[in-house]
Amino acid sequence: MSAAARLRAEVARAARAIGAPDDFVPVLERPRDLAHGDWATNAAMALARPLARKPREVAEALVAAMRLADVDVATADIAGPGFINFRFDPAAMARGLETILAAGTAFGMSTAGNGQQAVVEFVSANPTGPLHVGHGRQAALGDAISALLAATGWQVSREFYYNDAGTQIDNLARSLWVRVAEVCAIPATIPEGGYNGEYIAEIARSWLAQHPAPDAGVLREGVQAILEGRRPADGALLEAFRAFAVAALRAEQDLDLKAFGVAFDTYYLESSLYADGRVARTVDALIASGHTYEEDGALFLRTTAFGDDKDRVMRKSAAKGGDYTYFVPDVAYHVTKWERGFRRAINVQGADHHSTTTRVRAGLQALGIGIPEGYPEYVLHQMVTVTKGGEEVKISKRAGSYVTVRDLIDWVGRDAVRYFFLMRKGDSQLQFDVDLARSESEENPIYYIQMAHARLAGIFRVGGIDPSGITSARTAPRRQLAARDGASHAPLVSQAPRAR
């Protein structure tokens, strides 16, 4: 229990001793003027009416009833109409430092998680381009959550889920086909829904550097088919482009993450869910659960039974292609998390995934997974806008249509990017002001922290103190040390000149 919590509990006990209601909860606040003490309470004024006494009388009674020494309080002064200002015993503060120094890097950690397994999934970007600033916010949030869980006794696995299947990946392969054709001097246009960034042209040049140039006729036929919304006749070449582009962009994103200082324990591919038949098995299990039905040739999951506003299509009708809707592989993927022993799963995703939470949970509950409700847990974050020179920045030289994580790191540095992403709640909009992050002023929280660190380091430097020599034996107040062994001790910090 913290010193403040112990003090609050003692004020509450004393209040009950003088007749306060059992449910009375005193308020503790930091005084605006630190000269008044460490903590203050208005408990006397709050109790004046219930006790039918003057506030100062109540304050005097409270102080008299308190066991100040038991909570390491040196003084309790009554001020104004009945405020009580408390000041802790410096010796108690020193004992707190002793505890901190003795614990070392383990200070503040706990075993609350009791070694249980938890998986935190974050970033999980489609391998269709470099990581944008929204992914950066996810990376900062997910890594921080993982670190906090690990510090409280959980066995944490950081996981990246690659959506390497579906329409967006098909568009990526088609975009690369067009760029390869352009490099080979064949006129072509990126199809609607394709990717226009310079990075696609880079991948095209890289592909041609490692493979023989495709037949010009094959490329032309493919370009025409793509523009008409058809699949190129040479499906093997399109698949080769797809695999190459996905691998190249996975490597690109790994570089982004390395620059950001984020590492993952596992990478899980969406395509593997189809390759090993897990999606089909999950659908069969949902049908067997009795929570599905067919209508107009489509297969529905009765998600309304689990809180959704309407039932959702799992498999489209044959007339509409007969393929699975996007949430079905998500359910199959989360089944793997449960089967891998993760009874706690946290997903960090953009706010646009809000509707996904109900559908995935409904699918899992239909299978008897994640009951009671709340598996997996979701942390949804809002959008990030980037401003520079007083104007919003919307494009990147390489990505074309958005600002990348690497852009921000190049502009302001990794630590500043991480801090700015975490200094606002995830569910609030975030404006990343590049000029503020680079400014050398107290308005910039990063610069403020750096200056605070410099001043603290200056205390040791100017005072001629070796930080490595600070041990628990040297944390006691000077008078306590002198009283203990009759020796004279130089002050550790209190008389050091102010660092500038």
Image (cartoon, helix red, strand yellow):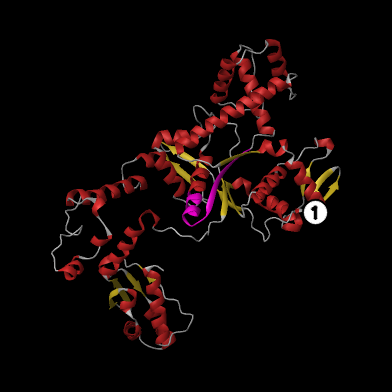
Q: What percent of the width, then of the height, locates residue 165?
A: 68, 34
Residue assigned mark 1: 289
Q: Residue at x 48, y 41 (%)?
A: 262
Query: Label 1 amino acid?
Result: Ser
Looking at the image, residue 172 lies above or below residue 484:
above
Looking at the image, residue 72 lies above or below residue 168:
below
Q: Is residue 275 visible?
A: yes
Q: Secondary structure at mark 1?
A: loop
Q: Residue at x 61, y 45 (%)?
A: 352
**Closer to us: 63 or 165:** 165
Quadrant, the N terminus: bottom left
Q: Is residue 81 visible?
A: no
**Closer to us: 128 or 250:** 250
Query: Any magenta on residue 302?
Result: no
Q: What percent of the width, then of the height, locates residue 379?
A: 56, 51
Question: Looking at the image, how many numbered discs can be counted on the residues?
Answer: 1
Looking at the image, residue 289 lies above or below residue 136:
below
Q: What percent of the width, then of the height, locates residue 71?
A: 34, 75
Magenta-highlighted residues = 144-162
The part of the image, by quadrant, that contains residue 86 is bottom left
Left or right, 124 with reference to 441? right
Query: Any magenta on residue 149?
Result: yes
Looking at the image, residue 272 lies above or below residue 496:
above
